[in-house]
């Protein structure tokens, strides 16, 4: 857009007044978006300024009222040399590599010509620009160069830095819209205590949703879990069977399923303390000195304990034998399920959790490529896949509604893993597609989407398979899966 006459006049007035103030006026910058190449790129510049000395990046909350945005604060210093006189502007470009990549550039004109290599008060020319709204847990590449730029055959003077934005737990980031939708402002206020045979967990629910799953875990082992709870009260209480012996050092994890983030919402952990249970079997007021009392009590006590122990052991064995006899005939063998997942599904959060769900709740023995890497390396992917297809009772295609931000949140799954799962998915889809045309073999396939995932156009062949949306259709899914 060309500036109109009045604004041209205003500009020239500004220019004149800046001439009058030269020497007195302060150097500053005037920044504006400039997506394309700067005009200075097109011409050959006789003299060009040197590069930047430093480039630093930080995140800051927006100072705009009513804005929850988190912005980048890009700051830089200029090299001290004579070429600074040529310097007209600095251009900064930010390249975001998240779920949706983004790219944007800003050009900052220096309002004055540089007359000295250092500012009047200070050792280096230093500037900063606050802008570029950022998303949580996303890597950004920030690149800056001076204008006029170096000519084609000269040294490149751009410098760049990498910056990974903080996650939703960050005190600034948690107020952004995206994090709020993922449950960042939910304060579950978890209290949990260990009883002899169970853990009692209390927590406050969120207004974002009413579905929760509570796990008791130790490192990566799940010691016990609740069903998916549908809670309608503000504070909930669940009891999960985990013995005190097993639960030593365990933590509670609460997985919420809010409609805004499905199975990818922010999960919370809490510590488990021991319940203040009243175990006070000896309420005798001790009249004798303690040591003497112990001396008297100990021998008969140990004999009694020993007898009790033997008795309990025999009873336990008897019970165990009885249990085996009672339950053995009802135990059915697990069915073999080959799990093929869309490469966009986050492996650790989504695929593994789903596989565990199948094993724990749907009597399944899951075949997962990532668990058989060695076999695949030996056999090759195609042979492995055809063999597994033959062996499996069921093949489940898993889609996740969110394009999970795998690279940052599911380490170490980035790069190569994503590629190999891409291969697996495409290959499986193509290999099994012919089956989808015959009714007889069709029954083997099921499609599961976590959340509202829609089938992409290229996978419409799968629309003939029964489809389930979890966790909504969890029960029919399990039933149909097992009904061979
Ligand atoms: C941005 O960074 C510069 C240099 O570190 C600092 O002086 C300035 O206060 C920062 N701006 C904000 C809004 O934090
Ligand atoms: C920045 O400088 C360039 C070239 O010096 C000029 O074309 C452009 O209008 C300036 N922009 C602003 C907003 O001052
Ligand atoms: C958290 O729970 C404890 C005990 O139930 C209670 O005293 C405290 O006020 C609660 N805090 C919040 C923020 O709800
Ligand atoms: C959970 O809440 C119940 C009922 O309010 C209370 O009796 C119990 O002590 C609480 N347990 C924990 C571990 O906070
Ligand atoms: C939750 O409670 C409200 C009022 O207490 C009631 O109207 C609603 O039907 C309940 N929802 C469920 C799923 O129980
Ligand atoms: C135990 O004995 C002490 C004094 O020997 C007395 O003060 C206390 O009340 C007694 N406690 C009970 C439970 O009898």
Image (cartoon, grey):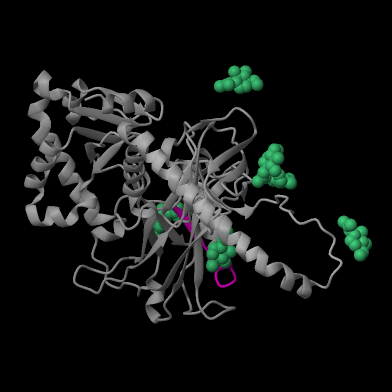
Hey, which residue is sitting farthest top in the picture?
439
Magenta run includes residue 215 = no
- State the count of labels: 0
The image quadrant in which ligand 4 is located: top right
Q: Is residue 151 left or right of residue 106?
A: left
Magenta run includes residue 22 = yes
Q: Position of residue 112 (x, y in %)?
A: 49, 66
Report the quarter where the N terminus lies.
Answer: top left
Using the rendered image of the protein, determine whether residue 484 is visible from the camera's viewpoint: yes
Q: Quadrant of residue 392?
A: top left
Q: Position of residue 354 (x, y in %)?
A: 34, 40
Q: Which segment did they paint magenta? A: 19-32
Q: Position of residue 32 (x, y in %)?
A: 44, 51
Q: Residue at x 35, y 49 (%)?
A: 348
Looking at the image, which is closer to me, 479 or 428?
479
Q: Position of residue 472 (x, y in %)?
A: 41, 26
Q: Is residue 280 left or right of residue 345?
A: right
Q: Residue at x 53, y 51 (%)?
A: 312
Looking at the image, which is closer to me, 103 or 211?
211
Q: Residue at x 59, y 43 (%)?
A: 185
* Image position of 315 with respect to 157: above or below: above
Q: Quadrant of residue 39?
A: bottom left
Q: Is residue 128 left or right of residue 46?
A: right
Looking at the image, which is closer to me, 273 or 323?
323
Looking at the image, which is closer to me, 140 or 54?
140
């Amino acid at each position: 857009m060309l500036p109109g006459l009045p604004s041209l006049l205003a500009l020239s007035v500004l220019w004149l007044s800046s001439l009058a103030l030269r020497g007195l006026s302060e150097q500053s910058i005037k920044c504006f978006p400039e997506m394309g190449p700067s005009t200075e790129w097109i011409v050959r510049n006789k003299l060009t300024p040197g590069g930047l000395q430093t480039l630093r990046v930080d995140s800051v909350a927006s100072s705009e009222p009513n804005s929850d945005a988190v912005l980048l604060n890009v700051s830089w210093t200029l090299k001290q040399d004579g070429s600074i006189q040529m310097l007209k502007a600095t251009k900064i470009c930010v390249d975001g590599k998240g779920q949706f990549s983004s790219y944007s550039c800003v050009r900052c004109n220096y309002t004055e010509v540089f007359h000295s290599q250092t500012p009047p008060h200070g050792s280096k020319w230093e500037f900063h620009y606050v802008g570029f709204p950022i998303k949580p847990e996303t890597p950004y590449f920030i690149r800056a160069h001076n204008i006029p730029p170096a000519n084609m055959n000269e040294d490149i003077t751009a410098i760049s830095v990498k910056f990974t934005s903080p996650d939703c737990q960050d005190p600034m980031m948690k107020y952004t819209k995206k994090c709020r939708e993922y449950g960042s402002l939910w304060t579950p206020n978890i209290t949990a205590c260990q009883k002899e045979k169970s853990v009692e967990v209390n927590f406050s629910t969120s207004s974002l949703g009413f579905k929760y799953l509570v796990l008791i875990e130790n490192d990566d082992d799940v010691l016990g879990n609740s069903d998916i709870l549908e809670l309608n009260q503000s504070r909930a209480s669940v009891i999960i069977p985990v013995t005190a012996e097993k639960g030593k050092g365990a933590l509670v994890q609460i997985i919420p399923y809010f409609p805004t983030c499905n199975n990818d919402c922010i999960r919370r952990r809490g510590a488990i303390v021991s319940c203040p249970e009243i175990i006070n079997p000896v309420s005798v007021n001790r009249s004798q000195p303690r040591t003497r009392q112990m001396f008297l009590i100990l021998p008969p006590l140990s004999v009694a304990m020993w007898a009790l122990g033997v008795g309990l052991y025999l009873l336990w064995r008897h019970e165990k034998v009885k249990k085996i006899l009672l339950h053995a005939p009802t135990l059915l063998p697990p069915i073999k399920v080959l799990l093929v997942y869309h490469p966009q599904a986050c492996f650790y959060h989504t695929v593994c959790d789903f596989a565990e769900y199948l094993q724990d709740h749907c009597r399944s023995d899951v075949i997962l490529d990532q668990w058989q890497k060695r076999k695949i390396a030996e056999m090759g992917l195609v042979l492995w896949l055809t063999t597994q297809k033959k062996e499996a009772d069921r093949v489940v295609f898993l889609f996740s509604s969110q394009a999970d931000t795998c690279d940052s949140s599911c380490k170490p799954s980035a790069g190569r893993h994503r590629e190999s799962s891409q291969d697996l998915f495409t290959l499986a889809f193509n290999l099994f597609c012919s089956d989808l045309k015959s009714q007889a073999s069709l029954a083997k396939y099921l499609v599961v989407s976590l959340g509202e995932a829609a089938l992409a156009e290229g996978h419409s062949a799968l629309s003939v398979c029964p489809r389930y949306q979890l966790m909504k259709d969890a029960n029919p899914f399990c039933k149909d899966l097992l009904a061979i």
